[in-house]
Image: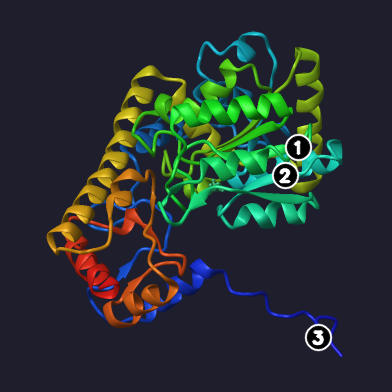
Amino acid sequence: QSLFNDVPVAAKDPILGITEAFLADQNPEKMNLGVGAYRDDDCKPVVLNVVREAESRVAGSNFMEYLPMGGMKAFTDLSVQLAFGEDAKPIQEGRVAAVQSLSGTGSCRLMADFMHRFLPESRIWIPKPTWANHHNIWRDAQVQQEQYRYYKAETRGLDQEGLLEDLSKGKAGDVVLLHACAHNPTGVDPTPEQWKEISKLMKDKQLFPFFDMAYQGFASGDCTRDAQAIRVFLEDGHLMGCSQSYAKNMGLYGQRIGCFSIIAETPEEAKAVESQMKNIARPMYSNPPLHGALLVKEILGNSDLKEQWYEEVKGMAERIISMRTLLRQNLEDLNSTMPWNHVTEQIGMFCFSGISPEQVDSLAKDHSIYMTRNGRISMAGVTSKNVSRLAEALHKVTS
Ligand code: PMP
């Protein structure tokens, strides 16, 4: 009798399942629209030139020792400036607690564990739908989860009414997870006016915003514009938490580099909160990895490199936006009777196409086009060469 006899095989990750089916497909024109990583117009992964430059500048660094528990201070200082704005009042007033995290996932997990330890009465409100890992993260941290309505299938847009109605049921001290921009998986973001309404309701109800910002700059091509939701909440004087990831916007996926921050009421509070963030990190992974922090610090800390990065992230965003335009145009040229306006109205890496799970299956079976069964198309896998084939296949399975 083995010790591991009763360990069941874990359920397959839906995205990995798609990749497996994609790899086994012999069709030379097959398309993988499941994966959430940027590709260029030849469907190739990209390393940004600015990252190459930063690499050459940090190469030969004779510091390879441990970072402190909270990571590299010069990095977290620059990172919170990017999220909240260089002249943000909470930064000037020393009210921001921040630690380097293991990318966006690691930030979320630190927040969840922080809630478990210090906010035991607080629940986490998660949008419906959301990035599936949010549920796992707060589940493993043993925090009670609530869901709020977000996406309206009939309009393929935001269910603002449902959202406000659900959040109004929150109790003071509850935490609300908000996708700062480029909502995953729907690509539907509130407008600035809608953000204002959400912010006001949350202020009235004393709900604490936690922004998951995995795509700053990657959505619109403009880092300030993509942080507009955060700026609205800052103007309203909210305290808030923020998760930043440099996976998408700098293409540093595997480096696991991000930042977890909390704006507190006073500098003393921020100091205490930051010390506890480090305390949570210590028994989990001791201290975060060095290389990604060196790269991001080099880029954000140097005005020329930062400018170059702005250009490159804009280039990635614009390629994706232009694929949306082309996809919609191709579908309309085919006289599709379905509405496809949401393809260009949604923003970010993903297009929530609105097709059924059965239609997704037939795209895979009959056209070698693979995506998650919720109909989410990763626009990163769409190129000027395959967009017309995608449009034709979508038209066929929907008519
Ligand atoms: N949050 C959201 C909404 C995401 O889409 C992602 C990436 N898929 C993440 C967090 C975390 O990504 P990472 O840990 O690679 O930064």
- Between the C-alphas of marks 3 and 2, the distance is 35 Å
Q: What's under tag 2, amino acid-wise?
A: Ile
Residue highlighted by disc 1? 174
SS label for mark 1 = loop
Report the Cα–Cα distance between label 1 and label 3. Answer: 41 Å
- Residue 29 is left or right of residue 297, and the answer is left
For the residue with label 3, is its CB less than 8 Å from the closest atom of ligand 1?
no
Q: Vertical placement of 84 versus 398: above or below?
A: above
For mark 3, what is the residue? 5
Whichever of labels 1 and 2 marks the residue nearer the N terminus, that label is: 2
Question: In the picture provided, is 102 more to the left or to the right than 351?
Answer: right
User: Mark 3 or mark 2: which comes first in sequence?
Assistant: 3
Foreground pick, 338 / 315 = 338
Mark 2 surroundings within 10 Å by alpha-carbon count, few (fewer than 14), some (14 through 19), many (20 or more): many
Q: Is mark 2 within 8 Å of ligand 1?
A: no
Please provide percent x and percent y for residue 74.
58, 22
Whether residues under marks 1 and 2 lie with C-beta atoms below 8 angstroms apart, the answer is: yes
Query: What's under tag 1, amino acid-wise?
Result: Asp
Residue at the image position 49 percent from the left and 31 percent from the top: 194
Query: In the rendered image of this protein, does residue 186 appear above or below residue 193?
Result: below
Q: Residue at x 50, y 18 (%)?
A: 85
Mark 3 crowdedness (10 Å alpha carbons): few <14, some 14-19, many ≥20? few
Q: Position of residue 254 (x, y in %)?
A: 50, 50
Q: Which mark is residue 124?
A: 2
- Is the N terminus in the top left, top right, bottom left or bottom right quadrant? bottom right
Q: Give the number of marks.
A: 3
The amino acid type, in three-letter code, at marker 3 is Asn
The x, y position of residue 378, in whole percent, is: 37, 57
